[in-house]
Amino acid sequence: MFEVNFFEKKQKNFLPYLMALIFFALALTLGAYFLLSSARYQQLENRNNAWLEEQNENLAISREIQRYQELTGEVQATQVILQEAQYPMTRVLDELISLVPNEQQTISTFDLNEANQVSFILVDMTVQTIANTMEDIKEIPYVTSVQMLRMENQQSDNQYLVEFAISLDETALKQEVLP
Amino acid sequence: MKLKWDKQTLLLTVSIVVILFLALFYGHVYFLAPKKEASEQLAQMVETQETVMETYPPDESLLQQYKDGYETTQAFLPGRENINEAILLLEQTAKQENVTLNRVSRIGEPQPAEGLGESYLKSGYQVEVSSTSAENIRNLIESLTDQERVWNVPTFHYEKYADNLYEGIFTFELFYHSMEN
């Protein structure tokens, strides 16, 4: 007796099927990972949204308090800036006019414009007084120049009318005023 | 059972790896990342709001206190021009200093105050006055510039017309803000 085997049985390769199985398992794991991660983020979002809704009224009050506090702080800081930037008109008037002798009688015109130019028209001044006054005004730290524009004899007792033009340095002036 | 690495199996394995990698990558980029970002942004916002609530406890009486504090600033830097109060003050002060108020006129439209941002404005006015002495007019200006609300007086002119007649012209600027909206 002998066995005759005409067709050799081929052995099936199961590796591809194994790979496919591994693929599905990994795909499922990946899917589960995405779903669970997504659900976690969603849960966090829901929790935060719930908190915001719950605290809505309290938050409105807190934000309003914050707004008033910031407004107040900003306004107070601005007030300081405005005070420092305020033109020291009184200081200029007091200082310049105090150097003019008998100002009630002698100052005919005073003018201070936005370009920090001062002009005086003084009357009933002697030449010596004019010279002294010019010298005194020049001594003021924020005065950059003093010019005599005209001097006219008033036809009485060596009295003259004089017109001065004075330039001021606003920066130096404000520095004088700052505490 | 036979497990053999043939060409077909190799190709299948490479395809599987590529597909899984692409799924992981694009899944993160287009699915998870936006959700993560939205969640983190919301969490950040909640954290910020918690800090606000901690710093400013939601108490009605505290709110009123801060409101009152802000109201006090209206006296020196109001949320509106308040020219009505200003001209009342001008008239009262002029009376106190024996100065006659002849004319008050506005100079142009309100302008942004320099160096303070667009929410701060200034209005300019010109005032014509007369008095029996220049000192009275200077005292008026001094009183105005000493107010809690800043009156900026950048120009001044006066002229003597007679022994007891002086006329003066000065300009003043008032500042206010519009931050309440």
Image (cartoon, coloured by chain):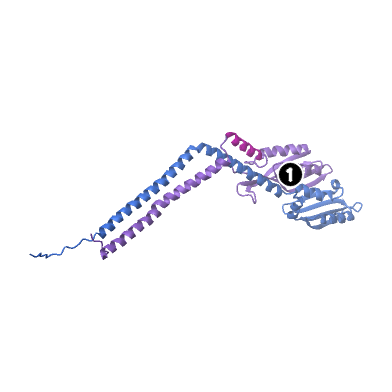
Chain colours: A blue, B purple
Q: Looking at the image, which residue is at 79% across and 48% down? A: A93
Q: Residue furthest front?
A: A1
Chain holding disc 1: B
Report the side of B104 relative to A55 (left or right).
right
Q: Which of the 4 image quadrants contains residue B84?
A: top right
Q: Amino acid at mark 1?
A: Thr
Q: Count the numbered circles shown.
A: 1
The magenta-colored residue range is: B60-73
Image quarter hosting the N terminus of chain A: bottom left
Q: Looking at the image, which residue is at 47% across and 48% down? A: B41
Report the side of B115 relative to A142 (left or right).
left
Q: Residues within 10 Å of mark 1 (few under 14, many from 20)?
A: many
Q: Which residue in the protein does label 1 denote?
A: B145
Residue B101 in the image: above or below residue A81: above
Q: Residue furthest left?
A: A1
Residue A16 location, x and y as percent?
Answer: 26, 59
Residue A97 location, x and y as percent?
Answer: 82, 49
Asked if the stretch drawn in magenta spans residue B68, the answer is yes
Chief secondary structure of the magenta portion: helix
Q: Which of the 4 image quadrants contains residue B16?
A: bottom left
Q: Looking at the image, which residue is at 85% across and 47% down? A: A103
Q: Which of the 4 image quadrants contains residue B69?
A: top right
Q: Nearer the viewer, residue A58 or B78?
A: A58
Q: Secondary structure at mark 1?
A: helix
